[in-house]
Image (cartoon, rainbow, N blue to C red):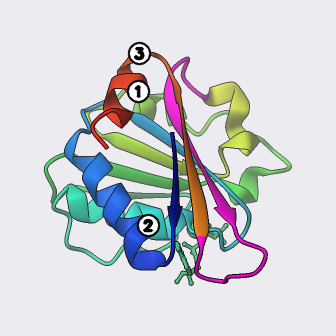
Amino acid sequence: MEFVVENEKQTQAIAQKLALGLQAGDVILLDGDLGAGKTTFTKGLALGLDIHKNIKSPTFTLIREYHTGRLPLYHMDVYRLEETGGQDLGLEEYFDGDGVSVVEWSQFVSDELPAEYLVIHLKKDEHDDNKRTLIFEPHGARYQSLIETL
Ligand SMILES: Nc1ncnc2c1ncn2[C@@H]1O[C@H](COP(=O)(O)OP(=O)(O)OP(=O)(O)O)[C@@H](O)[C@H]1O
Ligand SMILES: [Mg+2]
């Protein structure tokens, strides 16, 4: 499933809609270059979960937790783990937990990922700074049905 969006608002609107179908234990991997819009997408997800806090990039903290919405949101940015991987961080406890986990740069913790998840690829456009292609790639039946809500 694929969407072409023209601006940041449209990216967030899709994320917000996706959030309505989220359940405890869901895992979403956001794949894309620097500045592709992974954190922007997460802001839309948070809004859709009724989290009205400023979502800041967790680049230096690795994980930020938000507990004021319909479900807990665990926002991870594991860019800094490129060299080390993510053992000993207890990521499984987040993935198996009572909230929704969103991971930026998940390729750096590939050994820690669960068997099933939704990957969303965000691709920049060569000519238009505000345009993105969002590609939804479900791994597992749960995520297939989740994206059918879009
Ligand atoms: N259609 C769009 N969707 C998402 N972001 C967009 C779009 N158009 C422009 N932008 C801009 O692109 C930037 C995306 O930044 P963002 O922090 O979300 O990227 P990121 O993928 O999380 O980067 P990083 O890898 O550094 O964490 C923001 O400044 C945002 O305003
Ligand atoms: Mg980011």
**Figure check: 43 above or below 84:** below
- Per the image, the residue denoted by label 1 is 143
SS class, disc 1: helix
Instruction: State yes or no: discs 2 and 1 in contact (Cβ < 8 Å).
Output: no
- Per the image, the residue denoted by label 2 is 11
Find out if the beta carbon at label 1 lies less than 8 Å from the nearest ligand 1 atom. Answer: no
The reply to whether the magenta stretch includes residue 118 is yes
Tell me the magenta residue range.
Answer: 113-131
Q: Quadrant of the C terminus?
A: top left
Picture coordinates of residue 36 (x, y %)? Answer: 64, 68
**Given the image, on which type of amino acid does mark 1 rest?**
Tyr
Instruction: State yes or no: discs 3 and 1 in contact (Cβ < 8 Å).
Output: yes
Binning the other alpha carbons within 10 Å of mark 1 as few (below 14), some (14 to 19) or many (20 upward) gives many
SS class, disc 2: helix
Alpha carbon distance from label 2 to label 1? 19 Å
SS class, disc 3: helix
**Given the image, on which type of amino acid does mark 2 rest?**
Thr
Picture coordinates of residue 7 (x, y %)? Answer: 48, 78
**Figure check: 119 above or below 113:** below
Q: Nearer the viewer, residue 101 or 15?
A: 15
Binning the other alpha carbons within 10 Å of mark 3 as few (below 14), some (14 to 19) or many (20 upward) gives few
**Given the image, on which type of amino acid does mark 3 rest?**
Ala
- Per the image, the residue denoted by label 3 is 141
Q: Residue at x 41, y 27 (%)?
A: 143
Q: Residue at x 60, y 59 (%)?
A: 133
Q: Is residue 68 left or right of residue 115?
A: left
Mark 2 or mark 3: name the one nearer the start of the chain: 2
Find out if the beta carbon at label 2 lies less than 8 Å from the nearest ligand 1 atom. Answer: yes
Picture coordinates of residue 13 (x, y %)? Answer: 32, 65
Q: Which quadrant holds residue 77?
A: bottom right
Q: Residue at x 37, y 67 (%)?
A: 12
